[in-house]
Amino acid sequence: MNLQEFLLSINGCATLVSTSDGKFLGVVSSHQNDPNSICNPHGQYGSPHGLYSVRNEHGLYGGSHGFYSPYDPYCLHPPVIFYNDRVVLVVTRNTNLISFVYGTQLLSGIPIVDPDFLFAIYGCLGATTAKTQFQGGFQPVNLQPYPSTGISSYSQAQVQSENPEVWFLQGNELLNSQRYEEAISAYNQAVQIQPNFPEAWNNGGLALANLQRYEEAIAAYDQAIQIQPNYHLAWSNRGDALVNLQRYEEALASYERAIQLKPDIPNVWFLHGAMLFDLQRYQESIASFKRAIQIQPEFNEAWYFQGNAMLNLQHYEEAINSYNRAIKSKPDLLEAWYNRGVALMNLQRNEDAFVSFDRAIQLKSDFSDAWFNRGLVLFNLKRYEESVASFDRVIQLKPDIAEVWLFRGSALGELQRYAEALVCCDRAIQLKPELLEAWSVRGVVFAKLQQHEEAIAACDQVIQKKPDNPIGWYGKACCYALQGNVELLIKNLQWTFELDSRYREIAKTDSNFDAIREEERFQKLMDG
């Protein structure tokens, strides 16, 4: 019986098994109605387990079960065909290896079938279109069912090998087991035997990078690139190492070279965009994130970082749209909910912002920044009791943030709890004496308590520290408004508006001016 006849005889009866963990991958079958078949009658691979995987961002081939693609010329764990409790075939394109690993055993002497040949048989394309290494007779080899995995027998069996690919495979096994020092030794053996082995240099660089030996990792990637200048994975990995050394411009150049060589890898576009983002080149970073998303529409990290870039450019609507897409792909993406709230708050969409911050808090109950911003939007919504409760939660988590005490004091002032408000202002000033807003709010609280001298003195502290800052002058205007001194409030408001015209809009809705809002001179000043 030749190989083709044997494969046809086991159609629908054999299974494909991963040699990395012994998991079932599918039925070796051409039956159209078999939901687990590896090949369908249309000549397409239909495994639901992702058998024919692609390289990942680390430069290694990896499928969902930890085995490696049979199309990889250096495949680490080629899948095997299991029939009648025996391994009968190894599925791989690599015909150079002396032996294959199967758990703690070696698959020595097991016939190899090219994946295209398997595809031809079970994909009904005709065996004449595929190459095979076996033209003669075929006899299955006995082997025990898959034992527990272990690297020790493999290492011992291969340690004397003069085949660089064997050392490379051993290095890959060690790398994936996070035994980085041993992996480096194996890769060093591979390149000592065969110096022009770019994959070994690249993966050696990965092991070094995992040990945070980034300079050495870059040297290894450079060796791989010197041997194979168009090795895009080495260029990308080189960029990663340079990022860790904070050599950002060089990292950017490496990512750009990787993109030139292979422009259809979304993760490299994402890394390129992230690098531009870190360099505060936000508009350019957006272009890279868009390219990553174009290739992989559900790339939620790219959507999230695109939103961050939009947020930094104050393109709030676009930022919200990006965060919405990120959340759609990953509903528990905490940072996207939080930053979405920030964008909404900047658009004064306080109700929507509240929902976002509340969702962030549901995902992380001790997220102090979300509690703080929740308090701010509640303050803007005039829900002062709830605002105080949010600030109280922040203080429980981080008691020494001056701004939290300041806004808690402002909310308490709106609730006419003036004594408590003064305590908050004093605590904010104690923590951060240069926080001018705390001095100003303190002055307004004193004014509401009819302690006018203390009120003006607090605002004068601000003016003394920063005479060109409108906060002190505006605070004095509020104090004079509460006293009913129209002439002095107009004088101080005029000076405020000259320093910062935005305060005119603030004054239009500030309750401190309610008593004199119908005053003609005030209305004229408000009209500009």
Image (cartoon, rainbow, N blue to C red):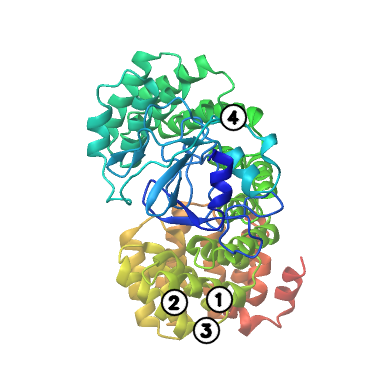
Q: Amino acid at mark 4?
A: Ala
Visible residue check, residue 52: no
**N-term mark: 3 or 1:** 1
Q: Going 54% across and 39% down the picture, which residue do you hit?
A: 3
The answer to whether 514 appears left or right of 247 in the picture is right
Q: Earlier in the sequence, mark 2 or mark 1?
A: 1
Mark number for residue 258?
A: 4
**Residue shown at 36%/51% (left/top)?**
21
Furthest residue toward front: 1
Q: Which mark is residue 383?
A: 3
Q: Are marks 1 and 4 in contact (CB under 8 Å)?
A: no
266 is higher (above) or lower (below) than 196: below
Q: Closer to the camera: disc 3 or disc 4?
A: 4
Mark 1 or 4 closer to N-term? 4
Q: Nearer the viewer, residue 149 or 255?
A: 149
Q: Residues within 10 Å of mark 3 (few under 14, many from 20)?
A: some
In space, the residues marked 3 and 2 are separated at their CA atoms by 19 Å
Q: Position of residue 335 (x, y in %)?
A: 50, 60
Mark 3 and 1 residues: CB-CB less than 8 Å, in contact?
Answer: no
- Determine which residue is flagged by label 1: 355
Q: CA distance from mark 2 to mark 1?
A: 31 Å
Whole-number angstrom distance, CA of label 1 to CA of label 4: 41 Å
Front: mark 1 or 4: 4
Viewer-closest of 236 and 138: 138
In three-dimensional space, the C-alpha distance between marks 4 and 2, rounded to whole angstroms, equals: 61 Å
Q: Which residue is mark 2?
A: 445
Q: Residue at x 53, y 31 (%)?
A: 134
Query: Disc 3, disc 2: CB below 8 Å?
Result: no
For label 2, the SS is helix
